[in-house]
Image (spheres, rainbow, N blue to C red):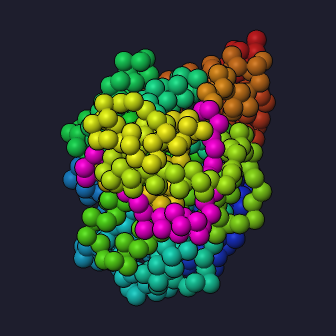
Amino acid sequence: MTLDPKQILADVFGFSAFRGRQEEVISHVLAGGSGLLVMPTGGGKSLCYQVPALCRDGVAVVVSPLIALMQDQVTSLRQLGVRAAAINSAMEFADLVAAENALRAGELDLVYVAPERLLTDRFLALLDDIKVALFAIDEAHCVSQWGHDFRPEYRQLELLATRYPAIPRLALTATADEPTRQDIVERLGLSPDDVFIAGFDRPNIRYLIAPKEQARKQVLSFIQNGHAGEAGIVYCLSRQAVEETSAWLNEQGIMSLPYHAGLDRAIRAGNQDRFLKEDAIVMVATIAFGMGIDKPDVRFVVHMDLPKSLEAYYQETGRAGRDGLPAEVFLVYGAKDMAKIRQFTENSGAPEAQKRIERQKLDALLGFCETASCRRQVLLSYFGEDEHEPCGNCDTCLNPPDVFDGTVAAQKLMSCVYRTGQMFGAGHVIDVLLGGNTERIRKFGHDMVSTYGIGEEYTRREWQSFVRQLVAQNLLTVDITGHGGLHLGAEAGPVLKGARQVMLRKDHAVAKPAKEKRKRAAIGVAETDQGLFEALRACRVALAREQGVPPYVIFHDSTLAAMAADRPRDQYGFALLPGVGGAKLERYAEPFLAVISGHSS
């Protein structure tokens, strides 16, 4: 028997209507269809398999790549009164046996497993003996070698199409460009006609990018001036940088924890648990941290180094503002960052065809960083969405840079690189262009080259920007195996000969983030409701500690904001709040109504 999905949405999840393409996808699955769903983080992907799981007979089997993600989803579902369990290697043997027995007995609505476990003979035999409602393959970009987080074990999930052809299979991801989507469809045996793309735009996120000057101080200013006391993630490229940056932020009064694969497993797990359960922690991490982090109130994400692609950037920045409330993402980078990413690609040992794809991805990333137009337009265009107007919510919209014919400047810069022997870094080359009187210039006789002092019409900071832009355009390259020496790029010749025009961006001085306290204003809490909102948050924290769960699995900030605004007086009014289903109504109406009553009296 198939239940009504709208009734399930209201009774269990506490929402009155589906959003976007949710209803279309759910109807497709309920009719027995399979497909690929590409939906932005925070868009409600999970409901697209959780609602059908509660409507169809049997258990939904959810393939998930990370234990942390499984546990978070299971905790949230149990809060809703849904019979859910995970089966993974981190469980005690007795708990594992109990979960498998519950699965055999038909006592579960959803079970979460890693692909490695699902594909074992033991687990497949178990599935053969039970009623399976559907398969959901989460983080489906892991299937594709063109995706940013390819995992070979995911490729073996093609077995599901042949072994269980009559059972719906829904692959889900927030991040997949056209080649990645095609690869997922082919590898999982899906129909190209059943690809649901719900859009990539995250309008609540503000995109900010700045030249890397003093990265730590830039990040500190960003946090202190706009996000003090809020949860966030700071990404670094190396483990050493993670630990040093986290320690430095703590010295500056920012509560920070490190996370990388080299940390002791217990420390890593403990830091992640604190990040999920406490309100104002900044996690400094490598990209080992993030996938499966369902914390909705992350208000900012910072990159202190370039990510490896626009897909990776989109995925990592997408961890901000999952609750749909305003968030900011901030990236600082320099020419050496570009060179490091290029070197990773060239030294990867991958087949040439894959290297070619990776080079194209890097070029797209650098184009995004160096664009003078709306960043959101560039980002969304990369994912195939070209119809968007300028967003008004990124740095290039808020403070547009000037674009000019920079051919002469490019020629001067490249000529100076050539005249000084293609062995010196940007700092020395710029010294020569500016007619400097340094010991190095005198030592190598560079005060005698024809390019000495020909660049005095631009400041040092402007020349630094031009270096980055020429590196992004493959007109210059950076040798990071030595001392960061600049070399002429493969496409430099036509520019030096005057056969190709170069457009450059002339940056404004870096504007300091507005010193505004937006923590409560951002989530729409009126000034008159601030006190009640804080009291409700305190109640939520107390309940979460009693149960040993993250506060957000009880209620999101948006639900608390609605409570503070509507001030329901009874269970009927409480039931009308967004995110309040039957189980949460029964469990939490009394304590929260008491807070509202006490604050109103």
Left or right: 457 in relation to 391: left
Q: Residue at x 60, y 32 (%)?
A: 510
Coordinates of residue 66 in the picture (x, y in percent): 36, 55
Q: Which residue is at a point 28% across and 65% down the rendered structure image?
A: 348
When the figure is inspected, residue 405 is found, relative to residue 561, above or below; the finding is: below
User: Which quarter of the rendering shows the N terminus?
Assistant: bottom right
- Decide which of 567, 94 is in the foreground and name it: 567
Q: Position of residue 142 (x, y in %)?
A: 41, 67
Q: Confirm whether the magenta stretch covers residue 110.
A: no
Quarter of the view holding residue 506:
top right
Task: Residue at 41%, 74% (x, y): give it.
Answer: 356
Residue 296 vertical placement versus 407 (above, below): above
The answer to which of 495 and 505 lies nearer the viewer is 495
**Which residue reaches farthest front?**
448
Q: Is residue 84 among the parts visible in the rendering? A: no
Magenta residue check for 487: yes
Residue 243 x, y percent position in the rendering: 29, 33
Query: Is 472 located above or below residue 237 in the figure?
Result: below
Q: Is residue 473 left or right of residue 88?
A: right
Q: Nearer the viewer, residue 478 or 442?
A: 442
Pick the residue in front: 438 or 292.
438
Q: Position of residue 174 (x, y in %)?
A: 54, 60
Which residue does the image show at 48% across and 61% down from the upper left? 475
Please state the extent of the stretch shown in magenta in the rendering. 481-510
Q: Image quadrant for the C terminus? A: top right
